[in-house]
Image: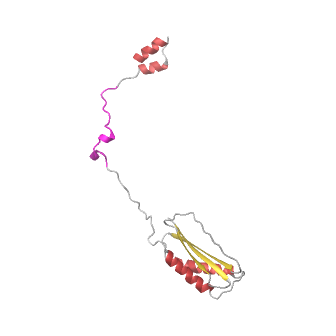
Amino acid sequence: LNITNRYRANSSSLSKVSLAITNLKVIQNVPLPPPISAMIASDIPPVCKYLPSYRLTSRNPFNREACEAILRESMDKSLQGVEYSSYFAPSLCQQICEDIKTRVKELKFDRYKIIVTVTIGERYMQGLKAITQFLWDPEKDSYATCIYDASPSLVAVGTIYAIYFD
């Protein structure tokens, strides 16, 4: 009523605002909820914690040492006594990759996608620099690499990438 009376004193006609304030009713004796800090721990219902129903890790994680041994054995067996030829190098790379991939898949690394690359280059008065960069999860993804340089006419670099697949 005090607010309405002020509006009446300030203006000759009642505005919509003053009418709305006049129609408000005051509710008394409504208890307010206690603050959270005043609640007892027994009054708070327990929070249910659910565990995931699926595995988050691999049962058989990638083993770098085993894969490096496979790379070394396959490249030694396939490239021993071979002379470099630009005509046969692509098919030789493909054959070595398939052999390595088959042997790595026999290890049954759970939840990993396997990628194998082999690069063969001619050793002829030049150097070779190979750089690999990754955009992956360093805790789950991994790689193994091997350099074959026992031949006087060629050099080969083999790499196995193991990408974790959820």
Q: Which quadrant holds the N terminus?
A: top left
User: Which residue shows up at 32% across the image and 50% down it?
Assistant: 46
Q: Is the stretch drawn in magenta largely helix, strand or loop?
A: loop
Is residue 30 part of the magenta span, yes or no? yes
Q: Can I make out residue 29 in this image?
A: yes
Q: Residue furthest right?
A: 87
Residue 77: horizontal and vertical position, in percent? 59, 86
Asked if the stretch drawn in magenta spans residue 40, the answer is yes
Front residue (pair 51, 146)? 146
| Residue in view at x 31 percent, y 46 percent | 44
Residue situated in front as seen by the camera: 147 or 143: 147
User: Up-down: is 122 above or below 110?
Assistant: below
The residues colored magenta run 27-45
**In the image, residue 76 lies at what x, y percent?**
59, 85
The answer to whether residue 106 shows anywhere in this view is no
In the picture shown, does residue 146 fall above or below 53? below
| Rendered view: 42 above or below 31 | below
Q: Is residue 124 above or below residue 53?
A: below
Number of numbered discs visible in the structure rendering: 0
Instruction: Answer with the quarter of the image where residue 148 lies.
Output: bottom right
Instruction: Give x and y (percent) for residue 151.
Output: 64, 85
Side of 101 where 152 appears, left or right = right
x and y percentages locating residue 155 in the rendered image: 65, 80
